[in-house]
Amino acid sequence: MNQNRAISRAAVTAAGLLIAALLGGCTAGGQTKAKDTSASSDPTIMTPAAVSEVDKITWNVFEGEPKTVDPFKSADYTPNMINSNLCENLLTQTPDFQIKPNLAAKASNPDPLHWVYDLRTDVKFWDGSPMTAEDVAFSLQHNLSDKTTFYNYLYGNVANIAVTGTNQVTVTLSSPDYLFNDELASYAGVVVQKKFFETHQADFGSPSTGVMCTGPFKFDKWTQGQSISIVRNDSYWNTSLKPKAKRIDFTFLTDSAAITSGLLAGQIDGTFNVPPASITQLKNTPAGTLSQGPAPLMETIVWANPDGAGSNPQVRKALQMAIDWNGIAKQVLGGVGQPSRLQTPSAAFGFASTQLDALEKSLPEPVSAGYDDAKKIVDGLPADVKAKKIQMVVPGTAKVQQFGVAVKDAANRIGLNFELTVVPTTGYSSYLYDPATRAGVDILYTAFWPNIPNPLDWLAATAVSGGLFNQYNYNGVDAKFAEARGTADPEKRAQLVADIETTLHDQLLPMTPGVKVDNTVWMNKRITGAPAAFAYVYYPWAAHLGGTK
């Protein structure tokens, strides 16, 4: 889910050249409205459907080798890209950002404190044994009781989980929670075989053991440092999603140049999140096809120090206006993004789409490189506020350093006292999750995506007390969020969400509107079928892969 995304280990271009690239086309003191810089004005959901079976596909996992394929502990690009084809959830989130029944044929809410799940009766684990209500209850209970699972925090309002029928499980809540059910389309609702887990609890998800699930592919082999192989599940219950690929080998290249070379040479058949520096090249080569689709992704900044200069709303406003969001979208992100009006991207609007679409359209276009007006704001600040140093920390990848340099340049142009600190990628997560490590740090970079296409999920992580990406400890919308989460009427709930988004937009806390980024996927001319939309972290996307002839 909500981790820093470290993509490239390439060397960083000199800072002066980065500034020139970012600011190309912008006047030194002018102000521009942020325009749509997407490479495609009509992003697609799915690439052309596969028409034939293939024996093997090699797919690259762009952030490298996972530590585990245990779905309870998987919440990032790397493990989820693989796990999503192995282990399934009670509900599913489709490539067009809908939440639908899956292993649970039906979910009902007979009263505010109960969710009842009637299970499919045709689902089998890879060993041929049927999925039972006991397996489902065990899996949900594990997320509830084990504090080390990533999804435990989503069970805060769950009081009890029980088998209530041969093919039925009931969740009892301590208070109404109209976010919980949708979360079961993430690994909060994953189902594993109880017997296998209990037998292999110490090494569940490890290279030697793998997992036992119900998905369209089966865990086959993990050669550490080299690849993870999965093979087709010929007994998969969902006959409408029968895989055409017999085997998929996942490789772990992280260097942008190496990924691009591997794609062009045919050593890798496909990848998501195409390296930004290679987008033009890969878009124009006859060796394959680059596709772009919608995604609930935001690359932006998070204010992290309530005692720093950013506690002054005018400082936040000035910096937000001065950042060249257009340049970041075009140069840093390869032209597959556009500046956002809200801190939540439209692909995550979910049940509140009508209200949030209307709110977004009512807001002015975001300002990019608005140096003159921003400098006037800074010039009017008290001297002691202007003197406070603003420290931003970014991980040491080429792309993110460019992002940081752009923010630093904006701050310097308008007279803010700004310092950019680059730290090793491997240690950056400590700044996100450890208050002691980030003590005194004012701004952090993040690339964020939610568990599910539901704005309450986004807000729970980014704007509410205790949220993983609320390093500022902001609590300005806590009461309204709690009200929304407990409101049964979806129209009233959606209006509460729109009110929250308005507050966050006006206050620029704690996460600011940045660049909403489209998903990219490249496949060589041998294969097709992968979703172009961002659907690979919880949906069995590889079941769509196959041959072009």
Image (cartoon, rainbow, N blue to C red):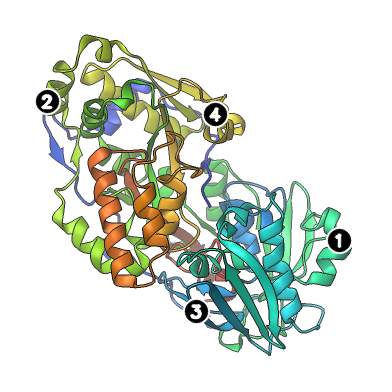
Residue labelled with disc 3: 109
Amino acid type for the residue under numbered disc 1: His
Q: Which mark is residue 200?
A: 1
* Element at label 2: helix
State which mark lies toward you, 4 or 1: 4
Q: Determine the CA span between mark 3 and mark 4.
A: 39 Å
Characterize the local packing of mark 4: few (<14), some (14-19) or many (20 or more) Cα atoms within 10 angstroms: some
Residue 217: where, in percent of width, then height? 69, 73
Please give the label number shown on residue 372.
2
| Mark 4–mark 1 CB contact (< 8 Å) | no
Q: Earlier in the sequence, mark 4 or mark 1?
A: 1
Q: Which residue is mark 4?
A: 435
* Residue neighbourhood size for the residue with mark 1, other residues' Cα within 10 Å, grouped as few (<14), some (14–19), many (≥20): some
User: Compared with residue 303, is residue 75 higher up or lower down, i.e. above or below?
Assistant: below
Residue 468 picture location, percent across and down: 51, 43
Q: How packed is label 3: few (under 14 Cα within 10 Å), some, or many (20 or more)? A: some
